[in-house]
Amino acid sequence: MTADCTPFQPYLSRWGLTADGAPFATRSSRLLPVLHEGRPAMLKIAVEAEERAGGRLMVWWDGDGAARVFAHDDVALLMERATGDESLAALVQAGHDDAASRIICTAAARLHSPRRQSLPELVGLDHWFRELGAAAQHGGLIAQAAAAARRLLGEPRDTVVLHGDIHHGNILDFGPQGWLAIDPKGLFGERDFDFVNLFRNPDEATALSPGRFPRQLAVVTEAAGLQASRLLQWILAFAGLSAVWQIGDGEPPDEDLAVAALAAAEIARA
């Protein structure tokens, strides 16, 4: 999606930036590649509250596990731009799915490590999952997912600051600095939650390929130090929530329901 340059102009002047590419847009933000003191950077303007919360979290991480923030205000973020040659999605396509997941787990561990500074404003997982509870009346996998969410949220464990949307497109190659995160949601809750998206990504064909789910379960639990039974419950819960979101947007929830079914089958088997 292309974007108008006009919203960026005040920031180009204020922060002494030079445009270094065409602007583009997502559903929740407007972005422009720029140069900041000669270094590649990305100027991001949030258009939704969720993105503003993510920006505050990027500032809080202060470049430790996430892209470094050079400047910010309430709606805009100027951050380092990834310029490395590798991508995790390409790594998966080259046959290195397990290696990509281990890279993501290592990056997540940096994000989850304790910090001394006061926490930014964050959204709790109980609030994040509220739509799933309301949709439980539909029965089937949605109801199973809602029941799993109620159990998990009723007895939270190992709570940390969460990225909230860790997947192959949000952990990028920053060259000598390694793999760093972008685009967090700014959540707080059980650490396991930050790994659920690995089972839905980097694309539907990969996520649902035969034998991939149990193999990735073993890889992720070992690399992240998680309990398989607990992670399966989170995968089921989030797949149900994502299906509810897809239905609400008028999109087919097929992939999410398929992932939920895989998780439910593993839970039953265990």
Image (tube, grey):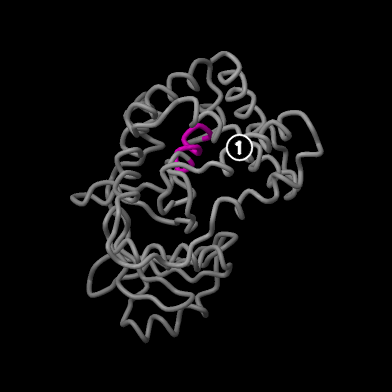
Q: Extreme front residue here? A: 155
Q: Residues within 10 Å of mark 1 (few under 14, many from 20)?
A: few
Which quarter of the rendering shows the N terminus?
A: bottom right
Question: In the image, is residue 206 part of the stretch drawn in magenta?
Answer: no
Residue at left offset 69%, top offset 32%:
254
Residue at left offset 81%, top offset 39%:
137
Magenta segment, which residues? 193-200
- Kindly tell me whether residue 239 is visible in this rendering: yes
Residue at left offset 68%, top offset 38%:
146
Q: Nearer the viewer, residue 111 or 126?
A: 126
SS type, badge 1: helix
Snapshot quadrant of residue 167: top left
Q: Main secondary structure of the magenta part?
A: helix
Taking 58 as reference, is 125 left or right? right
- Kindly tell me whether residue 20 is visible in this rendering: no
Q: Which residue is mark 1?
A: 151
